[in-house]
Structures are given as C-alpha cells and as structure tokens.
C-alpha cells in the first residue's frame, strides 16, 4: 500500500490534481480564500489525519455498513491491474 498511497498523495499537489477525478463531475474544485483546490485537496487530505480512517488504493468497495444514516464500516477487495 505504501508506494501506491505515496504516489497518489504526491499527485494531489500537482497543478493538474483535478485530473484525478476525470469522470466524477464537470466541476471538481472548491475555492478556499480564492485559491483553487481539487476535491481531494479540500476534503481528503485534512481527513487523513483521523485515527479511524485509512486510505487504500487499488480497492473496490463492495459493501458499506450503516448505523442509521452514518457509515460505520467498509468492506472492500484489493484489485490487481497487472
């Protein structure tokens, strides 16, 4: 996970970071103090410091576990692309 995660995170600081979300939406940026941020920079990076969150790359979610309207768990599988 380390190498893939590091490569993913290093791309977040690229001037073309919004290309990480090519198909997610037509408008995939937010503005904070007039600076343009991609969605991952605005929301994912600050959340990565949480003790109950980990980032997995090359993974596909197959089930979300809910407690009322809150996600409390994720079941996923690792995908190998080579």
Image: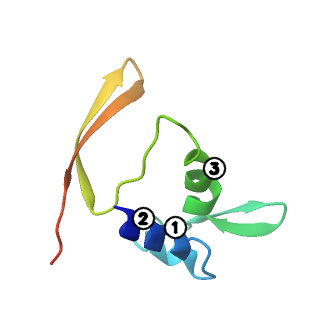
In which quadrant is the C terminus drawn?
bottom left
Name which residue lies at 56% across and 70% down: 12
In the picture of the structure, the residue carrying the numbered disc 2 is 5
User: Badge 3 is on which residue?
Assistant: 46
Q: Which is nearer the N-term, disc 2 or disc 3? A: 2
The answer to whether marks 1 and 2 mark residues whose Cβ atoms lie closer than 8 Å is yes
Q: Secondary structure at mark 2?
A: helix
Q: Nearer the viewer, mark 2 or mark 3?
A: 2
**Residue 5 placement (x, y as % from top left):** 42, 64
Q: For the N terminus, which image quadrant?
A: bottom left
Give the labeled residue for mark 1.
Answer: 9
**Residue 14 falls left or right of residue 62:** right
Residue found 67% across the figure and 66% down from its top? 37
Residue 32 is situated, as x and y percent measured from the top left of the image, at: 78, 59
Task: Specify few, some or many for label 3: CA neighbours under 10 Å numbering under 14, 14-19, or 20 or more.
Answer: few
Q: Residue at x 38, y 17 (%)?
A: 68
Residue depicted at 62% across the width and 74% down the height: 13
Q: From mark 2 to mark 3, how far is it between C-alphas?
A: 15 Å
């Amino acid at each position: 996970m380390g190498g893939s995660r590091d490569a993913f995170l290093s791309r977040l600081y690229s001037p073309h970071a919004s290309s990480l979300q090519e198909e997610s939406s037509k408008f995939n940026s937010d503005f904070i103090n007039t600076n343009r941020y991609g969605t991952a920079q605005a929301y994912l990076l600050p959340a990565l410091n949480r003790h109950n969150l980990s980032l997995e790359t090359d993974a596909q979610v197959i089930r979300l576990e809910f407690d009322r309207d809150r996600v409390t768990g994720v079941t996923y599988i690792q995908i190998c692309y080579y």
